[in-house]
Image: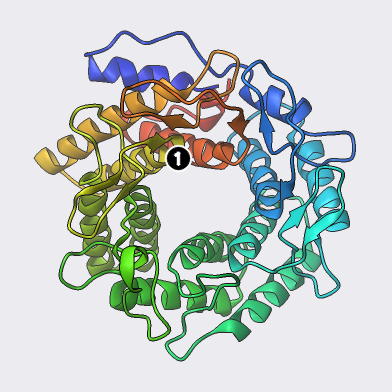
Amino acid sequence: MFVVLLMMLHLTQELEPPANPARFTLPLWSTLGQNESGAFAEALSLDARRVEMPRRARVQARQVYVFAQAGLMGWEGAWPRVVRTGLASLDADFIRHDGLMRTLLCAEGRPLDDTVMIYDQAFLLLALATALKADIGGVEAHARGAAIRDQLMTRATSNGALSEAGERPYQSNAHMHLLEAALAWEEVSDDPAWRDLADLIVNLARTTFIDAVSGRLREFFDSAWSAAPGDDGRLIEPGHQFEWAWLIARYARLRGDASAMTVAQGLYAAGREGVSERHHVAVNALNDDGSVRIARARLWPQTEWLKSALIMAGGAVGRERAVYMEDAAKALRALWLYLTPEGLWHDTRLPTGGFIEEAAPASSLYHIISAFDELTRSTEFSAGGQGASRALS
């Protein structure tokens, strides 16, 4: 896996390619990272041991997506078994009587929190759609996806935005993942409600989530969908600027909407403000004046920087395209720092340049596989058709 990374590093002509760090990534996470019943581990220690801890619904759904996507990309491992058993375990342990997912189980598998989070359901929808695309599922999956969507829409507030469970009900992030799910369903379903949902969320981003003056996308709001008071309302996450940019660029391509692409470009620029000039990584958080709030840098913002730079480059020409490709190479170098030769990763880089010694969270694999999918698409476009299957060889 990740041969494409080596190709991209060669293309920069500024850096010797390191040894392939991820030959064992998918085999490791599909064996040690999944138990006999199909349940996925929350984390693996850096010496490759399963860490027993409470299991989140979102991680189970993300891992189903990961291995369905790996199959679509040409991985020849046992991804159909992993996806089917992962879905079966999720259904047995997390699905409530109403068809929605509870948010948390203890390590032994007993329910700890029955709350229905929109964020979690978005990943269930993404997993179901990606499994369908990989020919796992059928008519019942279409009906199931529509039923989940329709239940979530009962949480709509007056402007169409959805109210999340928990202490911060008015937020943008759950909508972002619901947009990703809606776009995935558009690929496998002719139900116009998925298109309508994507249109709604992009419109919310343009009119509500993105600050009209700064162009930065906010995380938290009050009940009137204005910026939340205090520090919550000032929070800007560079990783989410990039992630929204990638999604809205995809949307713009699907709709042929040049104005949406302009929005994506603005969000990319907002995310770029959070890239440390000293360490060349995307930091965790800024304030709404552009100052750094949290200088630590998790792995996932680097994947979103890479994805968004690549999709922006795909729609640009000349010097603009070159700048985006230079950024993609920088993001790739940043991401590479986190990966270990055993198919694992560090999660958090400190401002000093070192990493926190902690287990590799399974949740990161969703970000990694999505970034490498975008990378293979870019390579196919620019290098004459290197298949995704080669990326996973």
Quadrant of the image occupied by residue 145: bottom right
Residue flagged by tag 1: what amino acid is it?
Trp
- Image quadrant for the C terminus? top right
Residue 343 horizontal/vertical position (percent): 59, 20
- Image quadrant for the N terminus? top right
Residue 107 horizontal/vertical position (percent): 81, 42
Work out whether 37 lies above or below 182. Answer: above
Q: Residue furthest left?
A: 319
Identify the residue at horizontal 50%, vertical 87% (top origin).
157
Q: Residue furthest front?
A: 230
Work out whether 321 lies above or below 225. Answer: above
Quadrant of the image occupied by residue 71: top right
Identify the residue at horizontal 25%, vertical 27% (top origin).
279
Give the class, few, some or many, for how many residues have Cα within 10 Å of label 1's Cα (few <14, many ≥20): many
Work out whether 374 lies above or below 97. Answer: above
Q: Which residue is mark 1?
A: 300
Task: Please tell me whether mark 1 sits on a helix, a strand or a loop.
Answer: helix
By what rule are the colours in the image chosen?
Answer: rainbow
Please name whichever residue, 37 or 138, is drawn nearer the observer in this view of the structure.
37
Residue 357 horizontal/vertical position (percent): 53, 23
Marks counted in the figure total: 1
Please name whichever residue, 130 or 63, is drawn nearer the observer in this view of the structure.
63
Please name whichever residue, 161 or 56, is drawn nearer the observer in this view of the structure.
56
Identify the residue at horizontal 30%, vertical 63% (top origin).
217
Residue 152 horizontal/vertical position (percent): 63, 77
